[in-house]
Image (cartoon, rainbow, N blue to C red):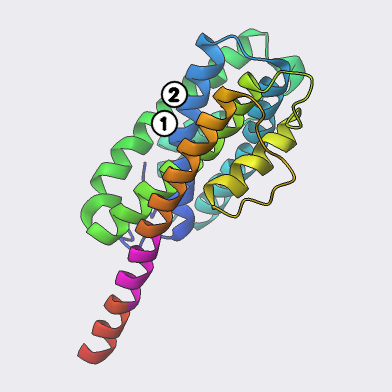
Amino acid sequence: MNRNNGNDKLRFFDIVIVVLSIYVLFALVIDSFFKLAPEVSKLLYLIDDLICVLFLYDFFYRFIKAPSKLKFMKWGWIDLISSIPTFEYLRYGRLIRLIRLFRILRAFRSVKYLTSHIFKTRTRGTFSTVSLISFLMLIFGSISILQVETVPESNIKTAGDAIWWSFVTITTVGYGDKFPVTGEGRVIAAFLMVTGVTLFGTFTGFIAAWFMGDKSNNKQS
């Protein structure tokens, strides 16, 4: 996965795309091996469509910037096919299985890229890890809460409700308009809160290290 076309300077967007590629692998496993409620499937497909928009933007951006279009397409065609959204009429045919196969290949290439480039520096590796865990926790919380909050008095009923609740819980904002009413839901909420506090502390440390690094570079220059 030649994301920088020979340039070692890593864009923030590169990290985002790598993290999303790895998420897609987890989403494929969940969608393939678990029986999901309709709202959960709707949530996964909605996120998938949004990610595909970013994938397509990333593909065309790198294609335009590539010095050699032919060399770029040696692996770029896999990224193009894996960026095709799985619309409703494609989800049960052979084409969707082919798209999923290419997405798996893209995810494994992203893991290789993650370990060989992003983790070269401790700060960059920390940020990438926190970003990946935060995104996975957001999706995990949304899926889990929809699976357990199925009682009539529940106020978390749609994919939008679940994403909103997971976001405010992980960020420890606790808006209060949506909340779990089942025992299982409260356990999930407690787990997300603890995870959110830990991630926030790590992210704060990353920002501090980044600023300290900038100050050191300025003094040296």
**Which amino acid type is shown beneath numbered disc 2?**
Ile
Looking at the rendered structure, which numbered label has been put on residue 104?
2
Asked whether 209 or 72 is in front, the reply is 209
Q: Secondary structure at mark 2?
A: helix
Instruction: Assess disc 1: are there few (<14), some (14-19) or many (≥20) residues with their C-alpha within 10 Å of its C-alpha.
Output: many
Q: Is residue 50 left or right of residue 125?
A: right
| Residue 99 horizontal/vertical position (percent) | 56, 21
| Residue 124 horizontal/vertical position (percent) | 31, 58
Check if residue 210 falls in the magenta segment.
Answer: yes
Segment tinted magenta in the rendering: 203-211
Q: Residue at x 46, y 36 (%)?
A: 191
Does residue 2 show up?
yes
Which residue position holds label 1?
A: 107
Q: Is residue 192 above or below residue 29?
A: below
Q: CA distance from mark 2 to mark 1?
A: 5 Å
Asked whether 38 or 165 is in front, the reply is 165
Q: Residue at x 49, y 44 (%)?
A: 193
**Which amino acid type is shown beneath numbered disc 1?**
Ala
Q: Residue at x 43, y 34 (%)?
A: 22
| Residue 157 horizontal/vertical position (percent) | 76, 27
Check if residue 102 falls in the magenta segment.
Answer: no
Question: Which quadrant of the rendered structure holds the C terminus?
Answer: bottom left
Q: Are marks 2 and 1 in contact (CB under 8 Å)?
A: yes
Question: Which quadrant of the rendered structure holds the N terminus?
Answer: top left
| Residue 82 horizontal/vertical position (percent) | 54, 29
Q: Is residue 93 above or below residue 201?
A: above
Predominant SS of the magenta segment: helix
